[in-house]
Image (spheres, rainbow, N blue to C red):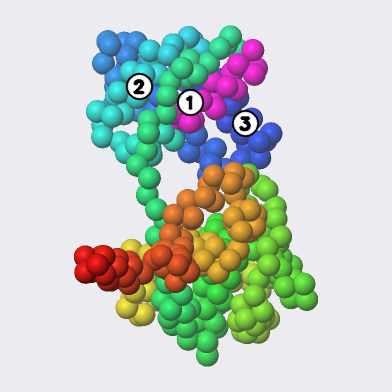
């Protein structure tokens, strides 16, 4: 689904070529702006938002070009003349369609970025989104695994064949470093520093960082690489740059990693709703529980804002309570109550 709008295309090019957003991220922004454009067109036609996608496919030849140009100009005019009330009406429309609060917040964030760009480019004087408040979202704590559950999952893939060794290496890397699945599948052979025990990560927005990795995970990766390198010698189509490859020697997809994890969750008898991202949550939670400071965990996760990392502090409440109960001198309320009763009895008898 595409929007035939010069200002939208200009914005998407800005995201891809100046902000260095990934093709997937830019596509998501484009989809949100397409839906907003459809809403504006429907509202301008008859006051009723349209559910029909924008399409110029019914026109042919030179007439198609004329229609396309006219539609693009009209859409640009609608987007550039949008008012705050239009944005609020759009949010009401999304609520009627029963979109989740998180989805509505994301779509609103797209509009904020889009109109901020238009202000920056002097296409409009002010953003119509500035006065619109983001809907308050329900706070959901990240799901994580206890260490024994992680250990059980990591030890499930067999290591006596190359695919099993690869899957074990994938799981070990995810838990050892806390990297995102998209970062994992982007790893190349030269991103692993065995001597320095670190990996080179290309994260969100093309940002790069160095993260430590455990010696035990590196041993598992080395074991997998022995299988991998032998297969590469017998396959001319093998991508020798890529670390984690599929059976054809090409780079694994994030979807493939999810399918592999689903398989091992079932084999290990663990919660099937767990995702590869759960290992990232588990990494962060276990690091905090074992004494790592929040700022260090933020760096390890590649979070731009500390507030993003702070969600994991809610998961450490159990650990803090255990420390409190074992350390606070007045925590044992039963003993204090018995002591108070004894004192009261002595006073009554005097």
Rounded to the nearest angstrom, the CA distance separating label 2 from label 1 is 11 Å
Q: Residue 90 bears which disc, if any?
A: 2
**Residue 114 magenta:** yes
The tag earlier along the polypeptide, 3 or 2, is 3
**Residue 2 magenta:** no
Q: Quadrant of residue 183?
A: bottom right
Question: In the image, residue 144 lies at what x, y percent?
Answer: 42, 64
Question: In the image, residue 49 lies at what x, y percent?
Answer: 29, 19
**Secondary structure mostly taken by the magenta-highlighted segment of the chain:** helix
The span shown in magenta is 107-122
In this rendering, the answer to whether 244 lies above or below 140 is below
Q: Residue at x 37, y 49 (%)?
A: 140
Q: Residue at x 24, y 28 (%)?
A: 96
Q: Which numbered disc, 3 or 1, marks the residue closer to the eye?
A: 1
Residue 278 showing in the rendered view: no
Question: In the image, residue 178 lies at what x, y percent?
Answer: 56, 63
Q: Residue at x 48, y 69 (%)?
A: 327
Quadrant of the drawing holding the C terminus: bottom left
Q: Secondary structure at mark 1?
A: helix
Question: In the image, residue 45 lies at what x, y percent?
Answer: 31, 10
Rounded to the nearest angstrom, the CA distance separating label 3 from label 1 is 16 Å
Q: Secondary structure at mark 2?
A: helix
Residue corresponding to mark 1:
111
Answer yes or no: do the residues labelled 2 and 1 have beta carbons within 8 Å? yes
Name the foreground residue: 162 vs 109. 109
Question: Is residue 40 left or right of 292 when viewed as pictured?
Answer: left
Q: Residue 13 bears which disc, if any?
A: 3
Question: Is residue 9 left or right of 199 when viewed as pictured?
Answer: left
């Amino acid at each position: 689904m595409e929007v035939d709008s010069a200002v939208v295309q200009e914005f998407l090019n800005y995201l891809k070529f100046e902000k260095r957003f990934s093709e997937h991220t830019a596509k998501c922004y484009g989809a949100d702006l397409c839906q907003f454009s459809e809403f504006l067109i429907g509202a301008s036609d008859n006051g009723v938002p349209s559910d029909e996608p924008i399409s110029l496919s019914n026109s042919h030849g030179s007439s198609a070009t004329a229609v396309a140009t006219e539609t693009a100009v009209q859409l640009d005019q609608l987007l550039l003349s949008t008012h705050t009330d239009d944005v609020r009406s759009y949010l009401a429309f999304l609520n009627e369609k029963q979109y989740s609060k998180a989805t509505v917040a994301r779509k609103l964030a797209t509009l904020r970025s889009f109109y901020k760009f238009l202000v920056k480019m002097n296409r409009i004087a002010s953003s119509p989104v500035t006065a619109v408040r983001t809907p308050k979202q329900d706070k959901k704590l990240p799901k994580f695994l206890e260490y024994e559950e992680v250990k059980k999952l990591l030890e499930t893939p067999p290591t006596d064949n190359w695919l099993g060794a690869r899957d074990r290496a994938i799981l070990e890397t995810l838990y050892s470093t806390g990297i995102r699945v998209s970062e994992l599948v982007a790893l190349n052979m030269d991103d692993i520093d065995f001597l320095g025990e670190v990996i080179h990560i290309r994260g969100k927005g093309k940002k790069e960082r160095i993260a430590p990795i455990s010696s035990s995970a590196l041993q598992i990766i080395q074991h997998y690489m022995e299988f991998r390198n032998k297969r590469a010698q017998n396959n001319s189509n093998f991508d020798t740059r890529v670390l984690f490859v599929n059976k054809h020697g090409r780079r694994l997809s994030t979807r493939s990693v999810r399918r592999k994890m689903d398989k091992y969750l079932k084999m290990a008898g663990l919660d099937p709703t767990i995702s590869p991202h759960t290992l990232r949550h588990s990494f962060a939670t276990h690091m905090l529980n074992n004494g790592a400071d929040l700022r260090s965990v933020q760096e390890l996760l590649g979070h731009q804002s500390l507030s993003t990392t702070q969600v994991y502090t809610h998961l450490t409440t159990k650990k803090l309570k255990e420390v409190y109960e074992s350390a606070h001198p007045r925590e044992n309320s039963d003993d204090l109550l018995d002591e108070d009763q004894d004192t009261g009895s002595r006073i009554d008898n005097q």
